[in-house]
Image (tube, coloured by chain):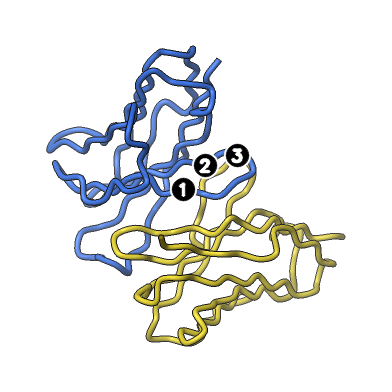
Chain colours: A yellow, B blue
Amino acid sequence: GENVEQHPSTLSVQEGDSAVIKCTYSDSASNYFPWYKQELGKRPQLIIDIRSNVGEKKDQRIAVTLNKTAKHFSLHITETQPEDSAVYFCAARSASKIIFGSGTRLSIRP
Amino acid sequence: NAGVMQNPRHLVRRRGQEARLRCSPMKGHSHVYWYRQLPEEGLKFMVYLQKENIIDESGMPKERFSAEFPKEGPSILRIQQVVRGDSAAYFCASSPPGQGAVGEQFFGPGTRLTVL
């Protein structure tokens, strides 16, 4: 079935440094790739998304890149801040449902 | 415009009882999705519904679980004869009509089910 792989599962970076999270997907027909941030005990919240007709999208300190040929996409967070600490999920839309990756727990060291 | 509402926020059941989880989508949204999140894990798709129709239930266990989204009222996820393994957070999400395959899903706060 459809699958989304996400790496790494945990990531610790120094405040101010960049963080990169990578995902691969299996369904070549996927055309929508959202990224969600989930703080402890809270709901997932969309932080950025990209559609398959675009290779890169940026929103302030957050950027996402998509390589449809290789079926992988990445989240880049620059100038990380303590409030960036959370679990991040990539996802890919496959037919009528969204398939989530297993999550990356990002910790920002002061 | 209120966001996606879920209730109850916390639900405790004993093994063998029934659990009913409710989700009211955002105003104007006609698509509802249910996900399950086990502790320290990702979100697993369960079911996708539109008003009075189940569109995709490929992620729903074949037994004990059912979902509906009636013409009037909230969407209901029903778990019969709960077992300890059903303990999880259940999130509902909604999206507006016409978004099709490329629409943002807005998540509710979740219902945390604990089975004793």
Q: Which label is found at residue B44?
A: 1
How far apart marks 2 and 3 lie (CA) works out to: 11 Å
Work out whether disc 1 and disc 3 sit on a shared chain: no
Work out whether disc 2 and disc 1 sit on a shared chain: yes
How far apart marks 2 and 1 lie (CA) works out to: 6 Å
Q: Which label is found at residue B27?
A: none
Dot 2: element? strand
Q: Which label is found at residue A41?
A: 3
- The amino acid type, in three-letter code, at marker 3 is Gly
Q: Quadrant of residue B103?
A: bottom left
Q: Which label is found at residue B37?
A: 2
Work out whether disc 2 and disc 3 sit on a shared chain: no
Q: Nearer the viewer, residue A27 or B98?
A: A27
Q: Is residue B10 left or right of residue A110?
A: left
Earlier along the polypeptide chain: callout 2 or callout 1?
2
Measuring 61% from the left and 38% from the top, which residue is drawn there?
A: B39
Q: Nearer the viewer, residue A79 or B44?
A: B44
How far apart marks 1 and 3 lie (CA) works out to: 17 Å
Dot 3: element? loop
Tell me, yes or no, whether the two marked residues, 2 and 1, touch with CB atoms within 8 Å.
yes
Mark 2 Cα within 10 Å, few/some/many (few <14, many 20+)?
some
Q: From the viewer's perspective, is residue B1 above or below residue B78?
A: below
Mark 1 Cα within 10 Å, few/some/many (few <14, many 20+)?
many
Q: From the viewer's perspective, is residue B3 above or below residue A26?
A: above
Measuring 34% from the left and 24% from the top, which residue is drawn there?
A: B20
Q: Is residue A31 left or right of residue A21?
A: left
